[in-house]
Image: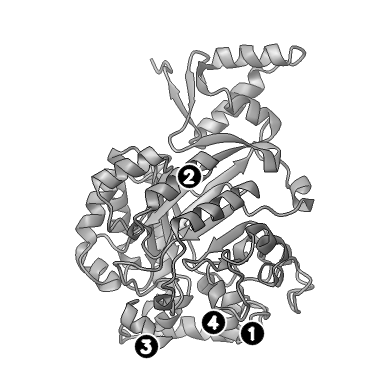
Amino acid sequence: MASAETPRGAAADAAPIPLWLLAEVTYRCPLQCAYCSNPIAFARYRDELETQEWISVLEQARAMGAVQLGISGGEPLLRKDLETIVGRARELGFYSNLLTSGVGLDEDRLGRLKQAGLDHIQISFQADRSGPSDEIAGGHHFQTKERMAQAIKAHDYPMVFNVVMHRHNLDRVDGILQLAWDLGADYVELANTQYHGWAYHNRAALMPTREQIRRAEETTQRWREKAGNRMRIYFVGSDYYDETAKPCMNGWGTTFLGVAPDGRAMPCHGAAELPIELPSVREEPLKAIWEDSHAFNVFRGHDWQPEPCRSCDLLQSCHGGCRCQALLLAGDAWATDPVCPKSPVHDRVLRAVEVADERRVEVPLVMRSVKNSRSLS
Amino acid sequence: MERNVKLRLGTGMRLQWEAAQSAYVMLYPEGMIRLNEPAGHILSRCDGRTVDALITDLEAMFPDAELADDVIAFLDEADAKGWLRTEGEDHG
């Protein structure tokens, strides 16, 4: 009786279920955050799935046992059919999570989404006030976000307050947590930047010093003691600094199934950047994609692993780390994740951290704009 | 936890039976906990009834078991994790 969790043994042998379905309904976005994890080439994804195609994805995934639905982007509120998608998700028994910047939201829409059965809203902030928020996201959106966070609570949604952390906001963590507290956040996710997509392009500008991360963690700990259960705070570290490989997708093809705006199915958020062909929900049933496609099987299990991972004790917990990072840093998607000290090219990560520590002159940000996307891809 | 406390699931928590997993699961923002059988029996009854009523129900289902202490220990733990909203506890 002491534990609610069923022992994992039985489940581990069973066929994997895509419990977490991420629907990236559009890559269009009113913000231009320089840390965005979307593909550099996002502007080329113009052929978005129609309402009925998304609904078919939901039905197929639910029949396979998917239970958590993330509706993300880009900015998902730019889809006018969001209420329809959410309504169908609720009928099917999904727990639906809207991941939004809050820009494009209003009281009416919050009410309609509530009525459609939306379970939870995660709203992103960039900083604790307007200036630093505008610098990283482009435009003037801070006050809108503040108002929308208040409205989210007024509509009695559980609210996750999400902030991507980097060199330009880590020193503001006290103010950020104060803002989250004042807005009544139920959960706060301080997620250090993961260097993929636009964030990798802006890595030199975004990487903090080790000291910044240490101080931010200390401040967070003080806040945890104050906030207790009223506001739960998660500080998601950076693997560059922790020197521990992330358990990529909790194991490739075990839990996560993402669908890009144009219908390409992704075994991880960054799969579009990998040298594998992504199957499309427009061409194949989701079940066949999940079970049989090359993309979902290429890194499934541990048989494909090279040394030093193959014989490493940590393999069961980290699965060899992030494939996108292996490609970006080692030039080989099959390599050991270079954040791991056992990687033969780990010095590249150490060097990047040292450079960030020693940096005196700030590097300008390249904003995630349509123009920049077109010129870089 | 006092036995006259009324039990409901916490805000944003949803409990449902998942055929694909042959289990009750507790869903919350961006997460899921797969429940074992006793936890499923208890949480699926947190619908506004009191701790006492819940124990009476379960004892009717499992007449041979002495359940009260285990159930209350589990409810305390679930409450600490934010899974429950409790009403009517006498703090006096």
Q: Secondary structure at mark 2?
A: helix
Q: Which residue is mark 2?
A: A88
- Mark 2 and mark 3 lie on one chain; the one further toward the N terminus is 2
Where B64 sits versus A129, above or below?
A: above
Q: Secondary structure at mark 3?
A: helix
Tell me where residue A125 sits by quadrant: bottom left
Which of the two residues, A343 or A366, is positioned nearer the viewer here?
A366
Q: Which residue is mark 4?
A: A349
Give the residue type that dot 3 points to: Ser
Identify the disc placed on residue A332.
1
**Viewport quadrant of the C terminus of chain A:** bottom left
> Same chain, marks 2 and 3?
yes
Where A154 sits versus A349, above or below?
A: above
Report in which chain the residue with disc 1 lies: A
Report in which chain the residue with disc 2 lies: A
Disc 3 to disc 1, how far (Cα)?
A: 25 Å
Q: Which residue is mark 3?
A: A375
Disc 4 to disc 2, how far (Cα)?
A: 44 Å
Report in which chain the residue with disc 3 lies: A
Label 4 crowd bin: few (<14), some (14–19), many (20+), radius 10 Å: some
Give the residue type that dot 1 points to: Asp
Disc 4 to disc 1, how far (Cα)?
A: 15 Å
> Same chain, marks 4 and 3?
yes
Q: In the visual, does A353 lie left or right of A327?
A: left
The reply to whether discs 4 and 3 touch (Cβ–Cβ < 8 Å) is no
Residue A232 seen in the current view: no
